[in-house]
Image (cartoon, rainbow, N blue to C red):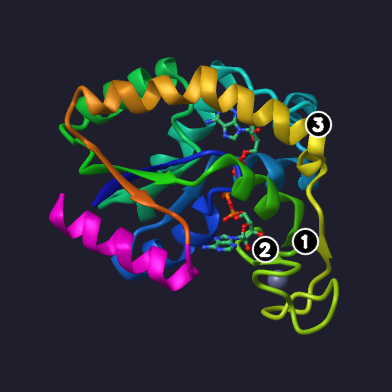
């Protein structure tokens, strides 16, 4: 399956993507995680992306599209993928369409996670992420680690993302409304969007998502 996951910052895209990718045996491709990995490795790409991310802005399309294309052309993505955080602009969605068309492929579904804004703010404020692996995500009250600041999965250090400060979150939400919501309309016109509520327990949201995907 080829799936795009959309939803506001903090909706639980990364949390759900980890389970969905496993259930569906497809790779989880997160452009946010790819940028953060580049930043921690000190690459040129990471240096270019960092200032945009820290300010809550989008990284320019040209850089993002090139990185996403490169990742999607890896052998493990040949038979499907779950895109998390890409595309985020209509230009990115058009570039993805072109890329898929060139390979005679198409998307199966765009899964839209719906969460009220006050919940998003609570989820982001309490989020803690593992330095070793971005898929190890916790929350100080909703999904607390056994030991403060220690990852339950690998023992790595948990930290708060630099773009999770209140001001930056507000900026990211504004960017989501102006630049990413039009992407949902773009896919709605193609009949690809399935919207589910992302409220409730993590496993209940995963069940809801699996049901919606199998019906789409
Ligand atoms: P990115 O990393 O994609 O961030 P985002 O879209 O803002 O999403 P988040 O990672 O904040 O949230 P999430 O929805 O994955 O939630 P999570 O599962 O962690 O992008 C960061 C930046 O990179 C962008 O601002 C931009 O600069 C750049 N970028 C990335 N892609 C780009 C692109 N395509 N173009 C241009 N720039 C790009 O969950 C949040 C918290 O809630 C966690 O603590 C979790 O434990 C908790 N939680 C999850 N589910 C539940 C639940 N059901 N109940 C209670 N708590 C829950
Ligand atoms: Zn870890």
Residue hosting label 2: 133
- Marks 3 and 2, the one that precedes in the sequence: 2
92 or 13: which is nearer to us?
13
Residue that label 1 marks: 131
The reply, left or right, for residue 153 in relation to residue 27 is right
Q: Please tell me which residue lies in front, 206 or 109.
A: 206
Disc 1 residue lies near ligand 2 with CB under 8 A: yes
Which residue: 71% across, 80% down? 152
Q: CA distance from mark 3 to mark 1?
A: 23 Å
Find the magenta span and give its range: 200-216
Q: Is mark 2 within 8 Å of ligand 2?
A: yes
Q: Earlier in the sequence, mark 3 or mark 1?
A: 1
Which residue does the numbered mark 3 point to in the structure image? 167
Structural distance between the alpha carbons of marks 3 and 2: 26 Å
Residue 213, quarter of the rendered image: bottom left
Disc 2: CA contacts within 10 A as few (<14), some (14-19) or many (>=20)? some
Q: For the residues carrying marks 3 and 1, which lies nearer the camera in this image?
A: 3
| Residue depth check, mark 3 versus mark 2: number of the one nearer the observer | 3
Report whether 2 appears left or right of 41: left
Q: Within 10 angstroms of label 1, few (less than 14), some, or many (20 or more) residues?
A: many
Nearer to the camera, 60 or 75: 60
- Disc marking residue 3: none
């Amino acid at each position: 399956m080829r799936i795009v996951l959309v939803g506001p910052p903090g909706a639980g895209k990364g949390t759900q993507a980890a389970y969905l990718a496993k259930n569906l045996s497809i790779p989880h491709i997160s452009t946010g995680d790819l940028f953060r990995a580049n930043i921690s490795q000190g690459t040129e790409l990471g240096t270019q992306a960092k200032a945009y991310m820290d300010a809550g802005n989008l990284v320019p399309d040209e850089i993002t599209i090139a990185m996403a294309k490169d990742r999607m052309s890896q052998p493990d993505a040949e038979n499907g993928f779950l895109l998390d955080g890409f595309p985020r602009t209509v230009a990115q969605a058009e570039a993805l369409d072109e890329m898929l068309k060139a390979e005679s492929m198409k998307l199966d579904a765009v899964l839209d996670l719906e969460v009220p804004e006050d919940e998003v703010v609570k989820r982001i404020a309490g989020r803690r992420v593992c330095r070793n692996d971005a898929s190890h995500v916790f929350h100080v009250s909703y999904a607390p680690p056994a030991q403060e600041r220690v990852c339950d999965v690998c023992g790595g250090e948990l930290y708060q993302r630099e773009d999770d400060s209140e001001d930056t979150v507000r900026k990211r939400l504004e960017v989501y409304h102006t630049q990413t919501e039009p992407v949902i309309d773009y896919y709605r016109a193609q009949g690809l969007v399935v919207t589910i509520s992302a409220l409730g327990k993590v496993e209940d949201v995963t069940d809801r998502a699996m049901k919606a995907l199998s019906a789409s």
